[in-house]
Image (spheres, helix red, strand yellow):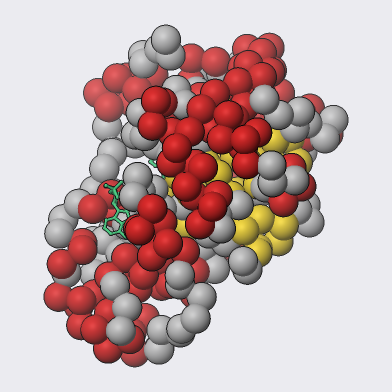
Amino acid sequence: MPQVTLNNGVRMPILGFGVFQIPSEQTEQAVTDALAAGYRLIDTAAAYQNEEAVGRAIAASGIPREELFVTTKLWISDAGEQAAKRAFDTSLAKLGLDYLDLYLIHQPFGDVYGSWRALQDLNRQGRARAIGVSNFYPDRLVDLIDHNEITPAVNQIETHPFFQRTTDQDMMRKRGVQLESWGPLGQGRDDLFTNPILTRIATAHGKTVPQIVLRWLIQRDIVVIPKTMRPDRMAENIDVFGFQLTGDDMTRIATLDTGASSAFDHHDPESVSWLGNLRLT
Ligand code: NAP
């Protein structure tokens, strides 16, 4: 599995498995299947309410800890220096681990600066090998970088053919922040899987549309974490390293960009307020 090197030297697989919206009672099986298919990066979050099931699958796998790359995320209701440290301990206990590979601030809301001070401490102590953020638009990201000691290693943001984030990626490159795509398959929205441009490219390479999309992101040096419940699709989504998209393919996919989210508007006050008031049970 090809790796990217983060700004603190930590190496991270370029492709992993996401567990958003996998019900906790099905998560242990899904992660077990993903590990069997060869995935070594697992992306969860306190908000997904399935960290314990992820932990059980990891423990049962027998895979040496150092071969795995485990990410979880801090939810808004746990923002703040002390609360974030407590939330980190809770997540780690649920996962049954004694360190994380990557800990992310899930959303750019609440007491982000207090949370970041906590994450910096956890990183200095080696309890989180890398720390980063998620859903940070460029203004929030630059402000966080400019007023803190440690630059986030990763910004996990919605990135797919209909929302390509090329200027955001340029800015992050300059600042040493790795782009990790969430929703790499656009969460299946907007008929992505039957899009005519993607379908033509897929046919030309003897591949599927999901494989073309994941390959396109990887060729842009973007980390991808597709989610699926199905072992056949897990195998399909990881089988993206034996071919290369041409410059012409890349140019044609570039035409699909709408420049806007298909999932969530982080600038809409109602949406921000709704998210900020979600409580973990
Ligand atoms: P996604 O991976 O873009 O798409 C998942 C959807 O695509 C599911 O409906 C899945 O269905 C389907 N799918 C997957 N592989 C397929 C294939 N080969 N053929 C056909 N359909 C396929 O969306 P996502 O789960 O939202 O994003 C991926 C991960 O990013 C999440 O699991 C989570 O870890 C992370 N994420 C983070 C945030 C954040 O705020 N930081 C937000 C969203 C997601 P089946 O399961 O039925 O196969």
Is 210 left, or right, of 92 in this rendering?
left
Q: Quadrant of the N terminus?
A: bottom right
Residue in the image at 27% along x and 70% along y: 209
Q: Is residue 170 left or right of residue 193?
A: right
Is residue 107 at all visible to an observer of this figure?
no
Vertical placement of 236 versus 200: above or below? Answer: above
Residue in the foreground of this view, choosing between 173 and 154: 154
Q: Number of numbered discs present?
A: 0
Q: Residue at x 28, y 39 (%)?
A: 264
For the residue pair 227 and 187, the one nearer the viewer reads as 227
From what the image shows, is residue 116 above or below residue 3? Answer: above
Image spot of residue 239 (x, y percent): 45, 70
Farthest right residue? 125
Q: Residue at x 54, y 68 (%)?
A: 221
On screen, residue 257 above or below 204 = above
Q: Quadrant of residue 72?
A: top right
Query: What is the x, y in percent for residue 210?
Result: 32, 65
Q: Is residue 11 visible?
A: yes
Give the residue displayed 66% in from the left and 13% down from the top.
86
Quarter-wise, where is residue 216 in the image?
Answer: bottom left
